[in-house]
Amino acid sequence: MQTVRPMVAGDVPAAAAIVRGLPDYFTANVPGQVEADAARHAGWVLADSDEIAGFAVAARKSARSAGRPGVTTGIRTGKGTER
């Protein structure tokens, strides 16, 4: 059964591996950016048993920056659902 839960530090290598496994969709610098973003921002994973099937990382905006453009990174993929 797939579940969504908050990302923890141990999930970051699996998230970066998803990106590395999709070279037609992501440039070589994106796995490192995923690792950096996951260290600074909130993230969630889609877990299927013990395997990470997908993830999302989102920057939180402060009240001062609400309504201003911000950076949000999100990726969801997994076996058989590459897009």
Image (cartoon, rainbow, N blue to C red):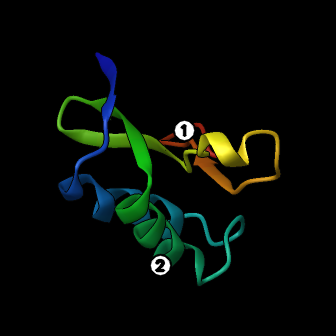
From the viewer's perspective, is the residue at label 1 or at label 2 nearer?
A: 2
Residue at the (25%, 41%) spot, across then down: 51
Q: Which of 46 and 61 is in front in this view?
A: 61
Q: From this viewpoint, which residue is outermost toward the right?
A: 68
Q: Which of 26 and 33 is in front in this view?
A: 33
State the image coordinates of residue 8 (x, y, percent, origin top left): 23, 48
Q: Quadrant of residue 10?
A: bottom left
Q: In this view, does 50 lie above or below 38?
A: above
Q: From this viewpoint, which residue is outermost toward the top?
A: 1
Q: Is residue 54 above or below residue 59?
A: above
Determine if residue 17 is in view: no
Q: In this view, does 3 lie above or below 67?
A: above
Amino acid type assigned to the residue bearing label 1 in the image: Gly
Give the labeled residue for mark 1.
Answer: 80
Q: Which of 38 and 30 is in front in this view?
A: 38
State the image coordinates of residue 82 (x, y, percent, origin top left): 62, 45
Residue at the (61%, 47%) spot, across then down: 74
Give the labeled residue for mark 2.
Answer: 32
Residue 72 is left or right of residue 4, and the answer is right
State the image coordinates of residue 50 (x, y, percent, origin top left): 17, 37
| Image mark for residue 59 | none
- Please state, as top left, top right, bottom left or bottom right, where the C terminus lies in the image: top right
Q: From this viewpoint, which residue is outermost toward the front?
A: 64
